[in-house]
């Protein structure tokens, strides 16, 4: 239960680029590609804009038939520690709501972020960390969201005559009194409806964490080429999905959940909508990865299997990843000869324990593995030495290098490596603003931009910016960029015109 609570809290995106920008987490590192391909970077990086968000639009259908995913467990490999976007995001909470990071630690019965990291990494448990019952866990989770959205006061800063009350419409944002709520309404009214969805999803996600909500799976009954986005995917899975959702709505797990959270159970259509959004949140990564393989023309029928490196992998991506989470990727490519997925990042969960070996993958199976460290170090230690297969595709989900000069410094060696080794690359971002800023940075680095635009498989689950609740919610992997090598197809002026004119 402890690890599940931590997952529930940390799944909320801590990083708000508007808060992170200008912060210095003390990142140091070489700003060059590995030795054999180093090339001087001459251009200065453009200034970086913070993100805002437009909800993604769902896309079209497709089909496939392929054997179920098989995963082979072996130990996680380690490299030198590096900068952590998770830690940076956690500390950035203080910039908007002073005392919020300490409140979160208090609710977890911890004294420091270091203790928090020990627990989520599965090391020595902290004394006193725990909950007597599920009701207490949900109450403490909700307490981490209790601060006035207008004046930012925490419960500890209230006078005896005041109490924090949530907005009755969204049941998500809190106010210390009518005056703050009235003053905040012009900002809150724009996001109130979306935040209502966030409040429901935050609780419903527990059903994924416990394993009670099992996603529909199995070979695709339609041709893979037909499935071009969520619209067609939902059409293809409709009968199976309807049965799954009906069973979930009537389940004991659903009844127990809503009896434990201290608020009324929503109507069935609200719960069904939430389950669908959660489903897209889980499947967005494997299907976006498949979209990248398609878009960049990667041959998945290569003898010995194909290799994908996920760089900058976060703790949330790996903490509760289960073997079946990537089954849908296999169904997207019937007849594939094996897919090897290696997740690399300084926040990769210690419990995510598989091998990064070069041995051939069995046809029709997917092998997941993890490596904790910076990608350019991983490249020199594992790829150049032949201990890990050379990637056919590299994917970065929300790298965030646009948000802070220090994050950019940490990412620069990896971006230069991808450019100089001509590695097919897919990057996803949360918003159009982040897309424009990221494109400008990649252009300044002379990276060859192949395509960019709205991702056909974004998460449709809105994510609330933790310490800035009235900021427009974001959607994971809402937009994508693909690149290969250097020398952009578009010159700087042409690309700027395209970005300014819309995707």
Image: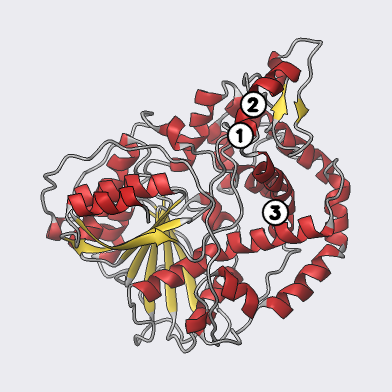
Measure how far apart labels 2 and 1 are at the Cα level. Answer: 7 Å
Single out the mark in the foreground, 3 or 2.
Answer: 2
- Determine the image quadrant of residue 273: bottom right
Visible in this render: residue 210?
Answer: no
Q: Residue at x 55, y 76 (%)?
A: 61
In this picture the colour scheme is secondary structure
Q: Identify the disc placed on residue 469.
A: 1
Q: What residue would you read off at disc 3? A: 205
Single out the mark in the foreground, 1 or 3.
Answer: 1
Q: Position of residue 77 (x, y in %)?
A: 42, 59
Of residue 276 and residue 232, the one placed in the foreground of this image is 232
- Determine the image quadrant of residue 162: top right
* Left or right: 469, with 177 as reference point: left
Q: Position of residue 16 (x, y in %)?
A: 48, 37
Q: Residue at x 34, y 31 (%)?
A: 26
Q: Quadrant of the C terminus?
A: bottom left
Q: What residue would you read off at disc 2? A: 149
* Left or right: 477, with 27 as reference point: right
Of residue 168 and residue 382, the one placed in the foreground of this image is 168
332 above or below 115? below
Of residue 125 and residue 292, the one placed in the foreground of this image is 292
| Total marks in image | 3
* Left or right: 45, with 265 as reference point: left
Measure how far apart labels 1 and 3 are at the Cα level. Answer: 19 Å
Q: Secondary structure at mark 1?
A: loop
User: Pointers 2 and 1 in contact (CB under 8 A)?
Assistant: yes
Q: Residue at x 57, y 24 (%)?
A: 97
């Amino acid at each position: 239960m402890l690890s599940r609570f931590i997952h529930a809290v940390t799944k909320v995106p801590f990083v708000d680029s508007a808060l992170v920008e200008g912060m210095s987490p003390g990142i140091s590192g070489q700003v060059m590609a590995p030795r054999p391909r180093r090339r001087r970077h001459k251009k200065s990086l453009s200034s970086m804009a913070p993100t805002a968000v437009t909800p993604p639009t769902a896309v079209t259908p497709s089909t496939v038939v392929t054997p179920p995913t098989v995963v082979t467990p072996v130990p996680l490999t380690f490299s030198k520690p590096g900068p952590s976007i998770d830690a940076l995001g956690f500390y950035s909470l203080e910039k908007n709501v002073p005392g919020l990071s300490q409140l979160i630690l208090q609710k977890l019965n911890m004294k420091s972020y270091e203790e928090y990291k020990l627990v989520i990494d599965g090391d020595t448990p902290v004394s006193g960390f725990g909950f007597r019952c599920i009701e207490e866990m949900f109450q403490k989770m909700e307490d981490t969201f209790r601060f006035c959205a207008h004046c930012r006061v925490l419960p500890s800063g209230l006078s005896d005559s005041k109490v924090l009350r949530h907005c009755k419409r969204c049941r998500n944002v809190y106010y210390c009194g009518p005056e703050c709520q009235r003053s905040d309404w012009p900002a809150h009214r724009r996001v109130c409806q979306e935040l209502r969805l966030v409040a429901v999803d935050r609780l419903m996600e527990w059903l994924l964490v416990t394993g009670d909500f099992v996603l529909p799976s199995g070979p695709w009954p339609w041709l893979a080429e037909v499935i071009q986005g969520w619209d067609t995917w939902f059409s293809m899975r409709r009968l199976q999905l309807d049965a799954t959702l009906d069973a979930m709505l009537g389940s004991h797990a659903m009844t127990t959940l809503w009896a434990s959270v201290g608020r009324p159970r929503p109507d069935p259509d609200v719960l069904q909508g939430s389950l669908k959004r959660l489903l897209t949140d889980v499947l967005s990564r494997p299907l976006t990865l498949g979209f990248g393989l398609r878009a960049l023309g990667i041959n998945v029928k290569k003898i010995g299997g194909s290799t994908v490196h996920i760089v900058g992998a976060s703790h949330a991506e790996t903490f509760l990843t289960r073997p079946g989470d990537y089954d849908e990727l296999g169904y997207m490519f019937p007849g594939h000869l094996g897919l090897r997925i290696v997740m690399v990042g300084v926040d990769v969960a210690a419990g995510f324990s598989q091998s990064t070996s070069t041995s051939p993958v069995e046809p029709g199976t997917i092998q997941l593995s993890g490596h904790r460290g910076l990608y350019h170090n991983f490249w020199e230690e594992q790829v150049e030495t032949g201990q890990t297969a050379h990637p056919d595709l590299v994917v970065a989900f929300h790298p965030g290098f646009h948000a802070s000069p220090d994050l950019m410094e940490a990412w620069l060696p990896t971006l230069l490596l991808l450019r100089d080794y001509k590695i097919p690359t897919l990057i996803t971002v949360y918003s159009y603003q982040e897309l424009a800023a990221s494109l400008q940075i990649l252009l300044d680095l002379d990276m060859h931009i192949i395509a960019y635009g709205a991702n056909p498989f974004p998460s449709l689950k809105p994510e609330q910016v933790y310490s800035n609740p009235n900021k427009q919610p974001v959607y994971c992997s809402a937009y994508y960029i693909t690149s290969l090598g250097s020398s952009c197809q578009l010159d700087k002026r042409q690309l700027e015109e395209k970005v300014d004119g819309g995707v």
